[in-house]
Image (cartoon, grey):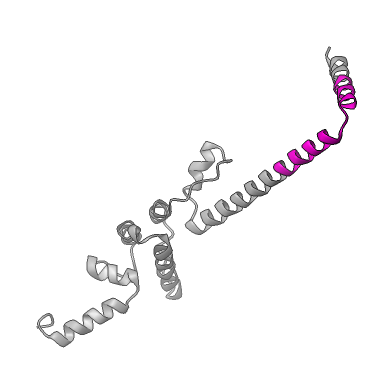
Amino acid sequence: MGSSNPVLVALAQARLRTAPLFARWCELNGACFCPARPADVTRFVSDCASLGIEQLWPAVQEISRLHASRGLADPTLGSDVTAAINTAAGIQPPRSWPAEQKLRFASLPYDMQVFVASHDARREKALRRAQNEAAAARRELAKNDPPQSRIAEENKADETNQQRKP
């Protein structure tokens, strides 16, 4: 009777349209919205990855807040959920990190990955800027430095290096 009554069908469709993304996904996939199972959250993240992390991350945070507000265990904190979110986000570990630490980067929660990656990018940019400024200063000094004094300095450095050798 429920599916043949057009008013009930319209109400159900309206409720589905205004429900949070995860609630709609649960209704369509026969999963429980609250309390949610980590496996269902993982599947939700994987199924909805094409929406992009900009839509997916707020939905995952909403799931977390809902469960915390009801005193329930947070189903978004498991390693499988983290892995699914990180796959959807596609944030690369910092280039300067050793290989074994890059693997560990993948286990960090998404918001920490964003922080670490942006912090490292700012650090790399500042380092490159400082290196470029130092190189420009060296070039400027070399332009202003007479060749004779440069040769004398190089000879003095060579003599010092020779004296240090056993």
Residue 158 horizontal/vertical position (percent): 84, 18
Residue 135, visible in the rendered structure: yes
Residue 129 horizontal/vertical position (percent): 69, 46
The answer to whether residue 46 is above or below residue 124 is below
| Magenta region | 132-157
The image quarter containing residue 64 is bottom left
Q: Is residue 98 left or right of residue 154?
A: left
Q: Does the magenta segment cover residue 148?
A: yes
Question: Which residue: 85% across, 15% down?
Answer: 162
- Residue 142: x and y in percent read 82, 33
132 lies left or right of 116: right
Q: Is residue 30 visible?
A: no
**Is 82 colored magenta in this rendering?**
no
The residue under the point 54% across, 41% down is 101
**Image coordinates for residue 51, horizontal then vertical, percent:** 35, 62
166 lies left or right of 74: right
Quarter occupied by the C terminus? top right
Q: Residue at x 34, y 66 (%)?
A: 36
Quarter of the picture holding the N terminus: bottom left
